[in-house]
Image (cartoon, helix red, strand yellow):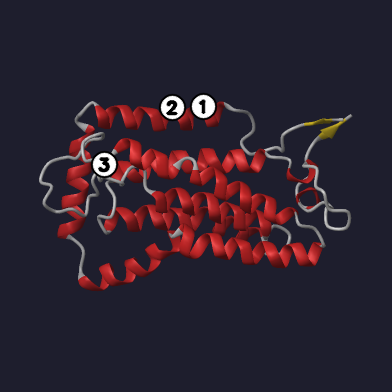
């Protein structure tokens, strides 16, 4: 039996290549101290000058929707538990484990490697480039990557349970809200968010390609299909 990857939309690897290339390009431009740094500073200074108190308070609440360890991972585990119980299969947890692993080995190491100070450090009066501040942990935005990956997980788990329009809103709307809040609150430079957007979509597409129902499991009574009941994987013999 030969197992093929699950289909994604748009199909093919061309979009994945563009996302990786875009992330690399932004990283190179920031490391090389190009004029794109001026865009970061201009956006940071503009939002700081146009952020009333009520907006700051409100958007800080919305920004918590991107906290991976405190909110998103536990929420995904809870949803996976109920889906596993309803379908009598542990396979929903495979996606949660995959999402945790893929974010763990990408977000943290990239932040440590790039060493970028946050836009909220207002003592910075010049554009902040990469590989400069040993304690910097700003690039890319973890909130945005987490939002794309984990709300994608939730959307996948809830496919067939919620209306398609609501599932689509979960997958796309909240990550865009996080991109806006992290920039508007000066938690991140705008390029932190754009790079995270590309990285997050790339990781989401990897997770959606995995044929989770074809992974062998040691369980006899809890190894039934889950994902193939929503969007069949292509399995050829």
Residue that label 1 marks = 17
Location of the C terminus by quadrant is top right
Find residue 64 and name its label: none
Residue visible at 44% across and 59% down in the picture: 66
Q: CA distance from mark 3 to mark 1?
A: 25 Å
Q: Quadrant of residue 12?
A: top right
Residue 135 point in image, percent of width and height: 25, 45
Q: CA distance from mark 2 to mark 3?
A: 20 Å
Q: Residues within 10 Å of mark 1 (few under 14, many from 20)?
A: few
Residue that label 2 marks = 21
Q: Is residue 168 left or right of residue 174?
A: right
Residue visible at 54% across and 31% down in the picture: 15
Q: Is residue 180 left or right of residue 126?
A: right
Considering only vertical position in the picture, is 221 above or below 193? below
Residue visible at 21% across and 48% down in the picture: 43
Residue 227 point in image, percent of width and height: 75, 50
Residue that label 3 marks = 116
Q: Quadrant of residue 221?
A: bottom right
Q: Nearer the viewer, residue 93 or 152?
A: 93
């Amino acid at each position: 039996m030969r197992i093929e990857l699950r289909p994604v939309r748009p199909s093919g690897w061309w979009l994945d290549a563009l996302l990786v290339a875009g992330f690399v390009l932004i990283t190179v431009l920031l490391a090389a101290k190009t004029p794109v740094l001026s865009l970061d500073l201009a956006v940071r200074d503009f939002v700081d000058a146009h952020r009333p108190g009520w907006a700051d308070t409100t958007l800080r609440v919305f920004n918590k929707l991107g906290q991976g360890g405190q909110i998103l991972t536990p929420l995904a585990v809870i949803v996976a538990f109920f889906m596993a119980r309803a379908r009598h299969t542990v396979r929903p947890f495979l996606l949660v484990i995959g999402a945790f692993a893929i974010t763990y080995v990408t977000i943290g190491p990239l932040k440590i490697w790039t060493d970028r100070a946050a836009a909220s450090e207002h003592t910075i009066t010049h554009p902040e480039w990469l590989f400069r501040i040993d304690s910097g942990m700003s690039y890319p935005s973890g909130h945005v990557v987490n939002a794309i990956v984990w709300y994608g997980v939730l959307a996948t788990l809830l496919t067939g349970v919620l209306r398609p329009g609501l599932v689509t809103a979960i997958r796309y709307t909240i990550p865009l809200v996080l991109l806006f809040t992290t920039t508007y609150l000066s938690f991140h430079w705008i390029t932190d968010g754009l790079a995270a957007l590309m990285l997050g979509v790339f990781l989401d597409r990897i997770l959606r390609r995995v044929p989770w129902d074809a992974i062998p499991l040691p369980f006899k009574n809890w190894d039934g299909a889950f994902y193939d009941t929503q969007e069949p994987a292509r399995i050829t013999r």
